[in-house]
Amino acid sequence: MGNPFASLLNFFDKRERFLIVELLSHGVRVSSVKADLEKEKLLLGKIVETDRAKLKKVISKFGNLSKLKIIIGLHPRFATTIYSGISLLRDNPRDPIDDADLDNLLSQAVWKFFDRHRAKAATKMEVGEIDVLLADVRIGQIRLDGHRVVNPIGFKARTIEVQLSQTFTTRAIVNELKAALPLSDAAFISESGTAWLHVISQLHKDEEVLLANVFAQETDLFSKRDGRLAFQDQLLWGSHNLVKALAAALAVSPGIAQDILQLCAIGEVSPAVAKKLEGVLIEELQTLINGLETALAKGQRIIYINSFFDLPPLVFSNTMKHKFSTVVRLFPANPEFVSVNYRFGLEYKELPAAYNLFSIAALILESNLLPNDKMSQIARKRVRWLSPMP
């Protein structure tokens, strides 16, 4: 494919500033980032990890929010984002599409998509359908009678196919966010994992991809299949499993085991020690491998692992790959992925205590990746109509 970076040039201001709010499985992370287009850099400023109860207090330390582009990324428990398509038949195919007709068609697409996926989102987030709210809508490609167009105005067509994403969240999360920040001013709200996968999938246009987001206690799986991107499953396996395995094998405390795992990840152990630990780690990693294999669709071979702790190099080695029963391609989701494929480096004065900077960069990129900003603005007018915010 062409360089995805090129499509971003028209969207970023030369020094656009962002406030990234992430509700993760283990708490909240708030970050400030400045995009320097001339230097092709994302400059990471303040970054704070806290618990959800302190979100409002933390956000107040980031200054005047009106000068920041607010982006919100939500854990799968708190949001459901689905990328898919909706097809509609026009009643008057011989008439050119005008502004009123387009507004009506997009409204139909938003409603049809919402109605089709609301029950599934409610089940996933474990709330009743009445408590499912539509937080964001974004329009992607539009096809008229199978032909892609940038702007449908003036064209005649019998069928219109709209590729779009919708983010569902819960009434409780909306109330929580509104108490901490001007939610109505948020430029982008998404289930983080699906947004990260969409950024990754731009490099694999015609291939199916599985993304594994590894946290301390669980691993969330997101899948791109047949052009549809969405949350797939959760594995009850995380970094604590590796720590627990090392602690048991070496007869040390979990704290010491955590330090050893960290040293392995940054290559600060001798080859002899690394070899000894490899057997322990690969045995525990087999549980993750089994879960990934179960999640793979037929023909799906590309797996990205996005970890919120430092992974030992073993995870992306041939030793790991050969433990799969089928041939797979394993890749890390990390800041280097962004800098290599999107030509944006992520800079910071010193390494923050909070790891996984890929998630911050990917949310910024995803907020600008969908091509039809004008169509998205029309569609977003329906968000409040479908889900009146309390």
Image: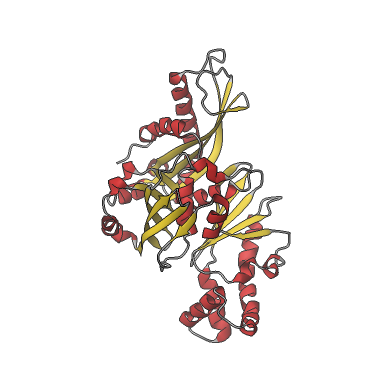
Q: Is residue 148 above or below residue 47?
A: above
**In terms of image quadrants, where is residue 274?**
bottom right
Q: Is residue 317 above or below residue 383?
A: below
Residue 76 appears in the rendering: no
Describe residue 316's horizontal placement relative to residue 217 as left or right: right
**Residue 160: % across, % down:** 56, 25
Q: Quadrant of the N terminus?
A: top right
Q: Residue at x 39, y 52 (%)?
A: 34
Question: Which is nearer the eye, 359 or 385?
Answer: 359
Q: Residue at x 68, y 58 (%)?
A: 329
Describe residue 216's horizontal placement relative to residue 293 as left or right: left
Residue 32 appears in the rendering: yes
Scheme of image coloration: secondary structure
Q: Residue at x 37, y 57 (%)?
A: 31
**In terms of image quadrants, where is residue 386?**
top left
Q: Is residue 94 above or below residue 272?
A: above
